[in-house]
Amino acid sequence: MTDTINPAAPHHLPIFIPPADGTDVFMSVMAVVLVVVVMAAGLLFLRLHTLPERMAHKSHKLQFEIVAVLGLLALFTHIHLFWVMGLLLALIDIPNFGGTLSRIAGSLERMAGIAPGKGAADAHDETGAVDGHHDEIPPPPRPIPRIVPASTTRT
C-alpha cells in the first residue's frame, strides 16, 4: 500500500477527515468530551436537585424529612412544584414548639403529682384500659392545692 492520494481527491484535506489507517483522533477526543460533559451535567443537576435538602439539614428533623420527601416526589414524578415547595419549606425557619409544649406538659405533670415523663405511660386507651391492662384501676387524681395569698387585707 502506498500513501499517495488519489488524483481525483483534493490535495489539502480538512483536519476532521481521518487518515486511511482508520484512527479517528477527533472522534476519540469528542467521545471523551461527551462523557465528561454528560457526567458534569448530571452532577450539576443532582447538586441542584438536592439544594433544598442541604438547606433544611440545619433545621429540625421533621422539617428535613418533609423536604426530603418532597425532593423524592419531585425526582420521581417530574412535578417541579414539589421541588419548589421543598425549597420554600427549607427557607422558612419553623419555630420549635416542642420545647414549650414539653415545659407545659412537665408543669401539668408536676401539678398532678405524676413523676416527670411518666404522664404518657398512664394514658387511657379507648376501652378505658391503662397500658393495655383491663383489670387495673387507675388511682384517683390528687386534688390540686389552692393557692391562697398570704395576706389579704381590705381597707
Image: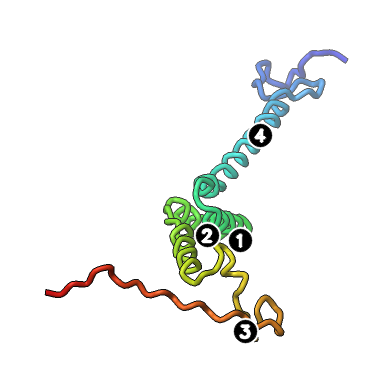
Do tag 2 and tag 1 residues touch (Cβ < 8 Å)?
yes
Q: Earlier in the sequence, mark 3 or mark 2?
A: 2
Of the numbered discs 4 and 3, the one sitting upstream in the chain is: 4
Instruction: Give the left or right position of residue 136, taking residue 82 as reference.
Output: right
The amino acid marked with disc number 4 is Leu
Could you tell which of marks 4 and 1 lies nearer the N-terminus?
A: 4
**Residue in the picture at 80% in, 24% down:** 22
Q: Report the mark closest to the observer, 3 or 1.
A: 3
Instruction: Name the disc covering residue 77, or none.
Output: 1
Q: CA distance from mark 4 to mark 2?
A: 31 Å
- What is the tally of numbered marks visible in this picture? 4
Three-letter residue code for mark 3: Glu
The residue at which mark 2 appears reads as 82
Q: Quadrant of the C terminus?
A: bottom left
Q: Nearer the viewer, residue 90 or 40?
A: 90
Which residue corresponds to mark 3? 126
Q: Earlier in the sequence, mark 4 or mark 2?
A: 4
Q: Position of residue 117 (x, y in %)?
A: 57, 63
Above or below, comparing residue 50 to residue 133 in the picture: above
Looking at the rendered structure, the secondary structure element under dot 2 is helix
Q: Point out residue 19 in the picture as x, y percentages from the top left corner.
A: 76, 20
Q: Secondary structure at mark 3?
A: loop
Report how far apart the C-alphas of labels 4 and 1 lie in the structure: 27 Å
Q: Is residue 4 left or right of residue 145?
A: right
- Check residue 34 in the rendering and tell me which mark sits there, or answer none: 4
Q: CA distance from mark 3 to mark 1?
A: 40 Å
Q: CA distance from mark 2 to mark 1?
A: 9 Å
Badge 3, how many Cα within 10 Å: few under 14, some, many 20+? few
| Circles 4 and 3: CB atoms closer than 8 Å | no
The disc, 2 or 1, on the residue closer to the chain's N-terminal end is: 1
